[in-house]
Structure formats: C-alpha cells, structure tokens
Amino acid sequence: MPTEKAGLAVLPAAKPQVVARSKEIDRLLKGLYPAELKRRPFCIIATGGYGQRVLCPYSDIDLLFLHQDLDEELLSQAVQAISYPLWDKHFEVGYRVCTLEEVLSDALKDLSLFTSLLSTRLVAGSRGLYRKFVSLFEERLISGRRKEIFQALKEARKKRLAHYQGEAYLLEPHLKEGLGGLRDYHFFLWVARIIFGLYGLKDMERAGLITPGEKAALKAAFNFLLMVREELHLLAGRKEDRLYFEYQPTLAVKLGFGLEVEAAIEKFMTGIYRAMTVIREGVEALFDHVEVILGLRPEERKLLAPGLEILSGRIHLLFREQALLDPSYLLQIFLFQAETGLKLHHLTRSFLKEKKPLKKFSGFEGRIFTKLLTKPHAYLALQSLRDTGVLLYVLPEFERLLGLTQFDVYHIHPLDEHLFLTVAELNRLREEEPDFWDLIEDEEVLFLAALLHDITKGQGPGHARTGAEKAYQIALRLGLSHKQAEQVKRLVAQHLFLVETALRRDLTEEKVVVDFARQMGDVGHLTRLYYLTVADSRATGPAAWNEWKMALVKELYLKAAKLLTEGELSQKETVKELIQREEKLKKDFGPLVETLPPCYLLHASLEEIKKELGLLQEFKASRDPLRLLVRRLNGVYRVVIITRDRPGLFAKLAGAFALHHLDIRSARIFTLTDGTVLDVFEVAAPYGEIWWEEIRETIKKVLSAEEEEELERRLKALKPLVCALKRPEKKPEIYVRLDNVNSDFFTIVEIFAPDKIGLLYFLAKALAKWPVNIER
C-alpha cells in the first residue's frame, strides 16, 4: 500500500494494461487486413495514444489509412472491412483515409493532426509506404520549421491551460488536459523530438537533457497518472478524464491508499498533485532551455553578484562546488530571485535538483531565508526552492506537506502551495493596504508565521496549537531571537482567532470587542494578525473569502485597534450614544421610537435606521402583511423584512430564502413592543441576478400557510445547484456548545454541522419548540 511519504516510484502503474490493450487491437487489425491489399501501396498506421501503445479502456483508437493512388471503391471496401468490426465491438475509432501528399498537406495546417503524427507506428501493410511517410514527414514538416513548431506548441498549451487551469480543476483535476497532466507529458516528448531529434526519456537522459533522477521521476509520474486514468475509465464506464469528487473515494480505496475514506482520498490526491507537479516542472524546464537554444531570449550576460550572473534573462550559478559547500552562497541565489523576479537558468536548476548540499544550514543562513520571504517575488523563490529540493534542507518539515491535499471545499490548493500563496498575498497586501503596514514593526516575524501557520495541518486536531510549538522551534533554528520566535508562535497559535471572532460573534456587543482586544495585548501583534488572517483567507480559495467576511474582519480590527490606542470604551459612552440616537429619531418618527428595543438603535448607522423606520411607518399605515427593503452591501444583500410576529416566524423566513438557494450569512431579529417584527438578514447568492419580487411572493406564501409540511417537503426535495461546489461527503461531525460567557445579554448557542439546503430552517424549527427567543 502506498504510504504518506512514499515517492512516486512506489506508486502503482498501469503500463502493462495499456500496452496489452494496444497489442490486442494490433492483433485485431492485422486479422482484418484485406488479403487483396497485401502487396498494394496501403497500410494501417496507429497514431496518437494508440501509436504510443498507451490505450486506456475507453480511449479513442486513432488510425491513418495511408494509400497511394488506390481505386476508391476498393479503398472504401477495405476501410469498411477494417472499421465496422471494431465499431461492432464498441470501440471508439477515429480514422483518416489519405494519400501521402494529402496527409502531409493537412498536417502542415492542422497542429492537432501534426502532433498525433509525431507518435506513429506501422500496424499492418506496406512497410515501404510507411518508411516513405516517416521520411517525408521529417523532411517537409519538421526540418527547417523547428522554431515555428515550438512557438505553435507553446501557444496551444497556453490556450489549453487557460481553460483547464481554473480553480475548479484544482480540486477535480483533468488527468489528460490539466497542468502537469498526460498531455503535458506528451508535449514534453514532442518538443524533445522536434528540437533535438530525441525519442523518449532514455534518449533525453543519454543526451544530458535530463538527469537520471528526473528521468525516473517523470516515468513514475506518467505511469501513475496513466494508471489512474485506466481505473477512472473502468469506474465511469466511459471515456472520462476528469477526476470528479464522486470518483475520488472509490479510486483512493481501490488503489490501496487506505480503508479510511477521508485519509485515503487525501493520500491519493497528494499522489496526483505530486505527479502532475513533476511533469509541470519538466515541461517548464525544457521550454526554458529550448527558448535559449532557439534565440527566443536575449543572450546578454551580466554579473549579478560574486559567483552569480544573469544569463539569457535567468539567474545562473557560476561556482557549483561552492554552492554545495557554502549554504549562504546557495541561499543567495534564491534571495536574488526573490528580489528580481528572474527564474533560475535551466543548468542551475538541473544541478541543484541532482546535487545535495554537503553542509548543514545554520542560523546565519536561516536569516537569509527569512529575509527572502519579505521580498516582492518571494513566491517565485519558494517555488524554486521546492522544485530544486533545497527547501527541504532549510525546512525538512515541508517534506510531508508537498502536494498534501486538504479534505474540504475551502482549500483548493495543496498545503505547500497554500503556504507559499499566503506569503505572496502578504506581499500584495503590503501594496494594497499600506495604511496599517507601519504598525507591523517586524516583517520577518509576520512572513515566517505566514509560511508556517499550517505546518502541522493534517496531523490531528488542534493544528494551530501544535503548529505554534513547531513554528517556535523552527524560528529559533533559523536564527530568530527568543522574542521573535515567541511572536511567530503567538501568530500561528491565533491565526484563526480573528476571523472566527469576526464571523461568529456579534461585533455590536462591546464585551466581544473588549475581550478580543485584551487577548491581542498590543496594536503591533493585532496588526500582524490582521494581515496574516487576510492573506491566509485569500490564499485558501474563493469559498473562504468574500467582501462580507472582509468587512467583518476589518470592522473587528479597527474597533480593537481603537481600544488598544485610545483605551477601553465605557458603558457611559454607549448609553450616551443610545440617548442621542433616540432623541434624533424621535424628531422624525415620534412615538414609534418608543416601541423599538434599545439594541435596535445601535445595530446600524443612523442613516440606515432612518430608512428602515420609514419602511416601518409604511407597513403600519397599510394592510400589507409584509414589507421588504433590499440593499447591496459588502458583496451581500442586506434584506430588511417587516411583518407581524407569529410562532416559528424565523424558521419560515429562513426556509423561504433556502427555497431560492440564498445563503444566509447573518440575521438580526428585533421584536417591537406592539408585536411587529423587524428582521435584518444578510444573504448571498451563488448565481447572478436575484429576482426579489419572486422571493417576496415566496415569503408571503410561506407566512400565510398554516401548515409547515409543504415548506418542509419542498426543502427536502430541493436539489443543490450545479454551480454549488461539493467535495466527497465526510463523516458528519455535529456538536452543540452553549456559551454564557462571551455575551452580557444572551446565551450563545454554537452549532457545528455539515451544511445542507435549509439547514438554518431546520435548526430554527428545532429551537422554536423551546421557550426561547432567537435574537441574532
């Protein structure tokens, strides 16, 4: 069974199956070859994947029927005699019937045909005709056109990845067309074939184009992805190359990654990402090398620093042996990369991947590493450190994290990539939000905490606590002082605290903000935590961050910062503000203000409250059972609903929103002394425009219905939207926590449960059975 730390070489492979399947098709075709054409200029040529002898269960069988001036009727009969029996056996057969001149002319204009003809072999028929085809293909289509073909291939890859490299494909990768997929592997071979005349990995190794280690890694990665594609076809019962969530559990268990489904999926997908990373690195390194050879980059040579130069727009290492003996010199390469944004020269990258440093890293070299994290192009440097393997000499703890997937809908990147992206997001935030950056004091502390904040993720619960201890030890090892290491430890320990407080607590309650500010202690730590929180969330994925969450996090940060710089708010100031608002509102709305609960007067800005009270006046003056006010705010819709109170009202309103697939982000319930209800919801939609008139009618129908069975039946029958992203289902973890500490006025009921359509409706309905009022 593959283990968590297993290299690609020990992962299962499908090569024997796909080769055997190709041989079986070969036997069928040879048996179907017409006897009357055995001495005629006619042959069957395998192209594409079949030409490479890598045929998965539902792969297309691509054939070229090549002939030279045969009678059309005889040719038609021959093609039918060969293809019809294959179709009868339910094979997907694609073919072309061409003369030599026709196929060469078509391939000159059609890149996909050209690439399929790069992998051909004779199955049956005239050897002389096939040899002539191979010779003319090389002479007319490749010779003298290498630069043109390379640029066309590179552009085709760019267009392909523009489609298959989106966020959805990170969680459900496309094994064939995705970044680092099987198509990229074939691009790798095509470029070597066209530019250098090399056929396969062995030739590339002999020519020194790749190292023995790179050859072994590429071969293992390709065979693993091919094996997964083989099993995916069998599982889907059709040609399917995208690893959708529904297939991941079965494949993970079947391929021996464990019997516990969640852990098996994580290990399986880690293997997928590691394999695709190996192929991606190989393609990019080869493309880099070819661009230099073809003169697509300037050949200038410029000294960058002692022992380092810029060669053809890339950082080139001059003293190789010194790099192995002097860790500070080695890390200077990546420091300059983080400063300049230049990639490593392909010769430097290959050397560093193949050779191991001979001396351990010390705290002195560690400070070079922490310094490079703060530079504008640190993300690029971290990728190079990982790709060359040098990162594991600085931070051996990262070996477990490479390609490690996380079993949730929020993290769309493998764990190592997420940590790199968090560092990159910090660099962006430094430019986007410079107002508070000066309060940080020590950038290296913040950036190192960003890189290490999930260092123990996947090793059991409480990764913030265990990660803090690990981060403290790493910080000391990298040469930070005990004070700095403590600051890193504290940031890692609290990296979820700010966002959880902002999203789970009522920020209008003074106690919430005061308690949070006291835990922060000083504005420097608060500011570092704020930037880390935003960077972490943005690096996680779109499902983890939006304008609404950003507004709440920033609100909590600003309120806490005010407390830490100006002192704690007093109850007298809150009462004073309440009285002032009440007096101002009475001038416009008179006795109506007397019916409002005091907490309502502080829940929003005075302008917002005036709009709502205007709507309340209209409601009282009319016989309309419902009034609705909608406004776009911070990426969500703020919906004010005014109606008469009744049993189970909140549950019914939640159910009405759920029927339209609206996600309720927050809700505030205000009941007036005369029995009128003014509820404020903040909702988000997974689709574009919202038809509020339809929603208004739904709410009216739900409120007028005496029986709840119809609403509940509709909710249970409602299907998720196609655009709703779902991972394979985890074991449900449901627990309830009652909190009488963090609010001066209410009992907080925290419910943790898997999300589903109408969840808030079912929770509110359950609470309605008890003698309690829902206030928030």
Image (cartoon, rainbow, N blue to C red):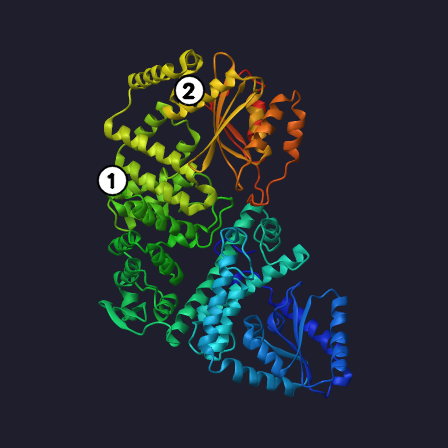
Foreground: 595 or 50?
A: 595
Visible residue check, residue 203: no
Mark whose residue sits in front, 1 or 2? 2
CA distance separating discs 1 and 2: 35 Å
Amino acid type at circle 2 is Tyr
Count neighbours of disc 1 (C-alpha within 10 A) and say few if under 14, some if 14 to 19, many if 20 or more.
some
Quadrant (top left, top right, bottom left, bottom right) of the N terminus: bottom right
Q: Is disc 1 placed on a helix, strand or loop?
A: helix
| x then y, percent, for residue 427 | 32, 49
- Above or below for 590 versus 352: above
Which residue is at 46% across, 78% downward? Answer: 146
33 or 694: nearer the eye? 694
Across and down, in percent, residue 426 comes to: 33, 47
Residue at 47% x, 46% y is: 411
With respect to residue 469, does 347 lie above or below?
A: below
Give the side of residue 318 with respect to residue 44, left or right.
left
> Which residue, given by chain and number where applicable, does mark 1 sit on?
439
Res 91 label: none
Instruction: Say whether marks 1 and 2 touch (CB < 8 Å).
Output: no
Give the residue pinned by disc 2.
Answer: 600
